Amino acid sequence: MNGGPSGFQNAPVTRTFIIATALLTILLGIKGRSVKLGLSYEEIFQKFHMWRLIASLFTFSSTPELIFGLYLLGYFRVFERQIGSNKYSVFILFSILASLLFQLLPLAYLRDPSLGRLAPGPYGLIFASFIPFYFDIPVSFRFRICGIRLTDKSFIYFAGLQLLFSFWKRSLVPGLCGLLAGSLYRLNLFHIRKIKFPDFVASFFLRLSSPSSRILPNVVSNVNSTQNIPSHLVHQTEEHNPSTLASSAEPSEAFVAQLITMGFDRSSARQALIQARNDISLASNILLEAQSH
């Protein structure tokens, strides 16, 4: 698996979401309110405490959940880099709202007292992300431990299972609802995968998460005019790969194979890697943007 640039470069929405989740969890945990969060029939359909509904979408109720949740959210930033911050913002909104709706349905119709409060936290977004993780992220290597076949993706699945069963039915329900929301997005319900927010949304999160960042307009403009790559992708290449000012290298056959497993033809994969100077994350961005037009 290639996560692309280190840190949260080109993933400002993910970075903001993680910071907000961590701060809310810590703040409400200190005040002892996190244990009172979580969707329940009484809270939603009788008392209707809106602040609890909103807080429940972002706040984990325990430290182990927070650790595994932030780890998974951080890893899944690869999807923001692949489809862009504007489309990823739509994915976040769709995942949260769709999974919330699916959670409300059993609470409204089953009224099962054994469910109690469902586990709070961004389960919808996390488990919706497992759908593109399964289909779009290729396996880089395989190995065995005690005779059991594993891949580099196995550890992400183990972290997801730990989070999914952290509170048994209380966490299982929102996790499954997130998987369902991710499946609907994958099926392109209402052409949701073509929708994206305006450019100012990504710019807002970029300024919010990296207020000190600076862009060199002249360098970007010159490189973009010669390589025909979108300016924000050129900026990514310049920061991540110092060789961008050098001549294009022969594309890596391993990277070509990975892009082919993601559904792109060999010719397009090679051309994208040449443009991206062998940066597979940037090359996948170029191919995905070309598909969306």
Image (tube, rainbow, N blue to C red):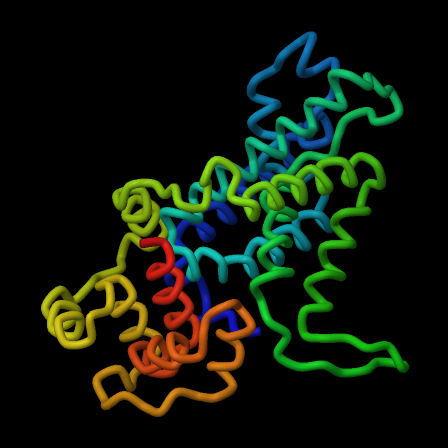
Q: Position of residue 242 (x, y in %)?
A: 30, 83
- Residue 219 relative to residue 253: left or right: left
In the rendered image, which quarter is residue 215 located in? bottom left
On screen, 18 above or below 262?
above
Disc count in the image? Answer: 0
On screen, 31 above or below 178?
above
The N terminus sits in image quarter: bottom right
Residue drawn 82% across and 17% down? 111
Q: Position of residue 132 (x, y in %)?
A: 58, 56
Residue drawn 49% across and 44% down? 91
Residue drawn 67% across and 74% down? 152
The C terminus sits in image quarter: bottom left
Q: Position of residue 75 (x, y in %)?
A: 56, 61
On screen, 217 above or below 90?
below
Residue drawn 73% across and 41% down? 176
Residue reaching furthest top? Answer: 46
